[in-house]
Image: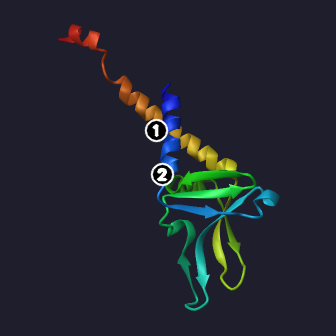
Amino acid sequence: MRAGELGESLIADLLSIDTIEVKTDRRWKETGNLYIETDCYYQATKEWKQSGMWVSKATHWSFVLEGAVVIVPLEELKIAVLEYGKPIMCNIQPNPSRGYLIKPVQILECIRRVKLDEIKAMDEYENKWTDPMEMEELI
């Protein structure tokens, strides 16, 4: 029952997201990877500046993947990219960029692990409370 309630709460939260960045990676089907930009080279200033994931104001990122959409909290996406991502340079002119390649399954694995840690912490918190019947014996 608790898992069902958590699922319902998640969907309600997703439907009320204020800020979401939508990405459509046209090559993911060929490569199996998503490209997550982190820096961009600006011709005008001739310097690299943080961009994409590092400067996004959105709370969530979504990836449109041929009939499916994956919506990820930005903070969890950052964790996944830093743990599983492969650094890469994208040399498309006039603004080359740097970022990471990551497989959707790696993002999902990171989210699964983060959520399992949260559930484990919640279980440990709930289990530290003593049963009311046992409390009477302790008093």
Q: Nearer the viewer, mark 1 or mark 2?
A: 2
Decide: few, some or many residues near mark 1? Use Cα within 10 Å; few <14, some 14-19, many ≥20.
few
On screen, residue 27 above or below 42: above
* Number of on-image labels: 2
Quarter that holds the C terminus: top left
Q: Position of residue 36 (x, y in %)?
A: 63, 64
Query: Residue at the spot x=66%, y=52% of the render?
Result: 69
Decide: few, some or many residues near mark 2? Use Cα within 10 Å; few <14, some 14-19, many ≥20.
few
On screen, residue 79 above or below 136: below
Kind of residue indicated by mark 2? Ser
**Can you identify the residue that label 1 sits on?**
118
- SS for dot 1: helix
Query: Residue at the spot x=48%, y=51% of the render?
Result: 16
Specify whether 46 is left or right of 88.
left
On screen, residue 49 above or below 65: below
Q: Farthest residue to the bottom: give it.
A: 44
Specify whether 116 is left or right of 102.
left
Q: Earlier in the sequence, mark 1 or mark 2?
A: 2
**Can you identify the residue that label 2 sits on?**
16
Q: Position of residue 71 (x, y in %)?
A: 59, 52
- SS for dot 2: loop
Kind of residue indicated by mark 1? Glu
On screen, residue 15 above or below 133: below
Query: Residue at the spot x=36%, y=30% of the render?
Result: 125
Q: Farthest residue to the right: give it.
A: 30
